[in-house]
């Protein structure tokens, strides 16, 4: 969500790019093992892909469950209590500004359709995607699934916060493919 860009749709249109990339890889070599590591909006894009991605494993880092929760968290982080009041004002602009509605930006509604193993990670101190938000996704994900909260990590610094642990956990997870 902190990525700079001229025009983002919070994972909606970006999901088409992820789907096209996976389809391209599968077209070139249908037997190759494919895993996606999606951080923040990258993870959202992976979950919003329709139909679900034909991948062998999915690693999700700090993925919001709904755009409503993501927006509220950020608004409160920067504006305090007034942020909660302003959140609906911002969300009501999605459709006419970006051509996508808040109801379409709900990765939590898509995670149950993921048929491959999923590793869901989040920073224990993340104020953008709070641990409770991550648990919302974990509860809806099918097994096999794993969850890891990186101690002392905020948003999008999981590898930097725990390099050795991160590499060890992700590689062990991917070796199970």
Image (spheres, rainbow, N blue to C red):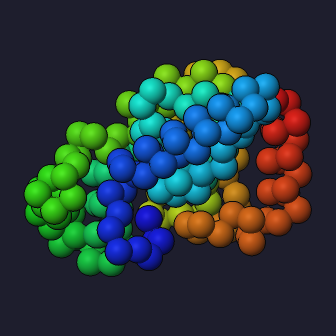
The quadrant in which the C terminus is found is top right
Identity of the residue drawn at 32% across and 68% down: 7
Query: In the rendered view of the protein, which quadrant contains the N terminus?
Result: bottom left
- Whether residue 31 is visible, yes or no, is yes
* Left or right of 174, for residue 95: left
User: Which of the 4 image quadrants contains residue 104?
Assistant: top left
Residue 90 spot, x, y in % from top left: 17, 64
- Tell me residue 46's x, y (percent): 52, 42
Q: Residue at x 74, y 70 (%)?
A: 161
Q: Is residue 27 above or below residue 152?
A: above
Q: Position of residue 126 (x, y in %)?
A: 53, 64
Instruction: Locate residue 90 relative to residue 75 in the image: left or right.
Output: left
* Residue lying at the far front of the rendered structure: 28
Question: Is 92 left, or right, of 68 in this rendering?
Answer: left
Number of numbered markers: 0
Q: Quadrant of residue 54?
A: top right
Residue located at (44% from left, 76% from top): 4
Quadrant in the picture for residue 58: top right
Q: In x, y percent, where is residue 91?
A: 18, 57
- Residue at image position (22%, 70%) is 83
């Amino acid at each position: 969500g902190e990525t700079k860009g001229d025009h983002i749709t919070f994972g909606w249109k970006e999901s088409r790019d992820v789907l096209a990339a996976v389809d391209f890889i599968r077209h070139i070599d249908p037997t190759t093992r494919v895993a996606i590591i999606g951080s923040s909006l990258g993870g959202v894009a992976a979950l919003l892909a329709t139909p679900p991605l034909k991948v062998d494993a999915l690693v999700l880092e700090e993925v919001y469950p709904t755009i409503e929760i993501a927006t509220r968290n950020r608004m409160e982080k920067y504006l305090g209590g007034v942020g909660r009041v302003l959140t609906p004002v911002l969300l009501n602009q999605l459709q006419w500004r970006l051509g996508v509605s808040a109801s379409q930006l709900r990765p939590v509604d898509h995670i149950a359709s993921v048929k491959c193993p999923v590793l869901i990670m989040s920073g224990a101190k993340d104020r953008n995607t709070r641990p409770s938000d991550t648990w919302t996704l974990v509860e809806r994900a099918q097994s096999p699934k794993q969850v890891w909260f990186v101690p002392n990590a905020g948003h999008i610094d999981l590898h930097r916060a725990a390099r050795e642990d991160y590499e060890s956990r992700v590689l062990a997870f991917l070796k199970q493919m």
